[in-house]
Image (cartoon, rainbow, N blue to C red):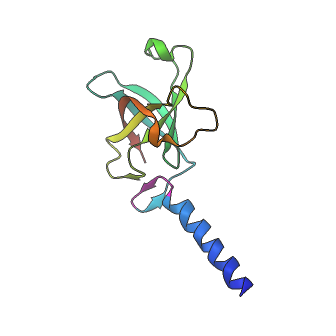
Amino acid sequence: MRQRTVFILIIIVCCSQFLMAAIYKGKNIDGKNFSGQLWLKNETQRYNVSVVFIKKEARVVFAPNQALPYRFSQNMHFTLHLKNERIEDPEQVPLLELIPPENSTEADKDTTNWKIAAYWFMNVIL
């Protein structure tokens, strides 16, 4: 009985990790570094970036030697959030820039209540 319980718990943990991962063509792409271009919705300026997907997060690093928006001039990296864990079209991946509520704490990692600050898109080479 105890072995069965342990086995079921292991299966649940393994499945939950796969279900929460960034997926492209049925494959988990979490933790791998990709190159791409990033742009704000309704803007034409594109930025060369590298990105690592971790679950619903896209951790973005701007490539050096390019003109960046003022708010990124001191910070070459930031985190965006995948609109959906499943990436259907790598040429136009929808991403959200989220900000936590004013009264949130560092422990508040639940992004469902966060506000959308900007919509981004990414053309990523998978």
Q: Residue at x 45, y 38 (%)?
A: 113
Expressed as whole percent of the image width and height from the top left, the position of residue 88 reads 33, 52
Q: Residue at x 49, y 30 (%)?
A: 101
Expressed as whole percent of the image width and height from the top left, the position of residue 83 reads 38, 44
Q: Residue at x 25, y 25 (%)?
A: 42
Q: Residue at x 32, y 42 (%)?
A: 91
Q: Which residues are magenta?
A: 20-25
* The residue positioned farthest toward the top in the image shown: 70
* The residue positioned farthest toward the left in the image shown: 42
Magenta stretch: helix, strand or loop mostly = loop
On whether residue 75 falls in the magenta region, the answer is no
* The residue positioned farthest toward the front in the image shown: 103
Q: How many badges with numbers are in the image?
A: 0
Q: Quadrant of the N terminus?
A: bottom right
Expressed as whole percent of the image width and height from the top left, the position of residue 95 reads 39, 38
Relative to residue 96, is residue 33 drawn left or right? right
Expressed as whole percent of the image width and height from the top left, the position of residue 19 reads 49, 61
Q: Is residue 100 above or below residue 93?
A: above
Relative to residue 108, is residue 25 drawn left or right? left
* The residue positioned farthest toward the bottom in the image shown: 1
Along the viewing direction, whichever of 46 and 101 lies nearer the viewer: 101
